[in-house]
Amino acid sequence: MRTALFADIHSNLEALQACLAHARREGVDRFAFLGDLLGYGADPVACLDIVAGLVGEGCPAVCGNHDLACLGGHLESMSYAARDAIYWTREQIGPRERDFLAGLPLTVAEDDRLFVHASPERPQEWTYIVGEEEAEQAFAATGARIVFVGHVHEPLLYFTTPGGALRLFQPVPGVPLPLSDYRRWLVIAGAVGQPRDGNPAACYALHDAAAGTLTHHRVPYDAQAAADKILSAGLPEQLAWRLITGH
């Protein structure tokens, strides 16, 4: 089973379509969605239509903090630009989209894998895994051998050593990494719709369960078109600029 892992689409239709096309050329069998389908971008309904169709075909998906906020969740921890985008998105989505979002779980467990937007350690608190301490807490909260997360907007990988210590690895785009059965892995998939690692190309991860490998991919897309839509919608200019700069 070859699974394409999409996190943090953030209503960016151009990035989503580019990553879907790339993953299909890579011969994936299915997609998994790691939350934050909405927020920031200008195409919430179109993105949800695509994702909901794939989820209806059996693809796993989890809820992100921006998705929950679009249903009326608290916004205190979000920036003013993020809040403006949430308020705008709430006006765009209708009952069908709200029902779909309300049905998304916080986690999905599957064999030796776990899908979650933030940390499996109290996922409802939306903890960012930004260091070994948070990674250790994430591993301690689940027995899964491989944990797939989003939320951080940067492709990263934490793994355990034979002695139990944690290591951080920066994946090289397009290069398959063997996932040893004797280690545990925490895969941060990167962001489809709003990368923040200085590279504006969309990012997703591909897990090949049969081969035991993981590959992060960077996919160029028409970021200018997505940014122009943000400006045309009257959303904060910085949200458009972020797509161009990758920060």
Image: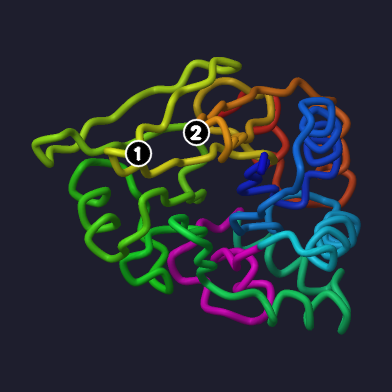
Q: Quadrant of residue 241?
A: top right
Decide whether the magenta segment is chiefly helix, strand or loop. loop
Is 100 positioned to the left or the right of 151 in the image? right
Give 133 or 211, whichever is nearer the viewer. Answer: 211
Q: Residue at x 15, y 34 (%)?
A: 162
Q: Residue at x 61, y 53 (%)?
A: 81
Q: Secondary structure at mark 2?
A: loop
Is 49 positioned to the left or the right of 39 in the image? right
Image quadrant containing the N terminus: top right
Do the residues bearing badges 2 and 1 touch, measured as CB atoms within 8 Å? yes
Give 89 or 100, whichever is nearer the viewer. Answer: 100
As drawn, 46 above or below 132:
below
Q: Amino acid at mark 2?
A: Gly
Q: Quadrant of residue 90?
A: bottom right
Q: How many labels, in total?
A: 2
Q: Residue at x 54, y 37 (%)?
A: 190
Residue 230 coordinates in the image, percent (x, y): 81, 44
Q: Name the residue beneath numbered marker 1.
A: 181
Give 138 or 184, whichever is nearer the viewer. Answer: 184
Badge 2: residue crowd in 10 Å (few <14, some 14–19, many ≥20): some
State yes or no: residue 46 in magenta.
no
Q: Residue at x 29, y 57 (%)?
A: 138
Residue sticking out furthest to the front: 210
Give 74 or 3, whichever is nearer the viewer. Answer: 3
Image quadrant containing the C terminus: top right
As drawn, 14 above or below 56:
above
Q: Name the residue beneath numbered marker 2.
A: 212
Q: Which mark is residue 29?
A: none
- Between the residue at mark 2 and the residue at mark 1, the CA separation in whole angstroms equals 8 Å
The residue stretch that appears in magenta: 61-81
Q: Secondary structure at mark 1?
A: loop
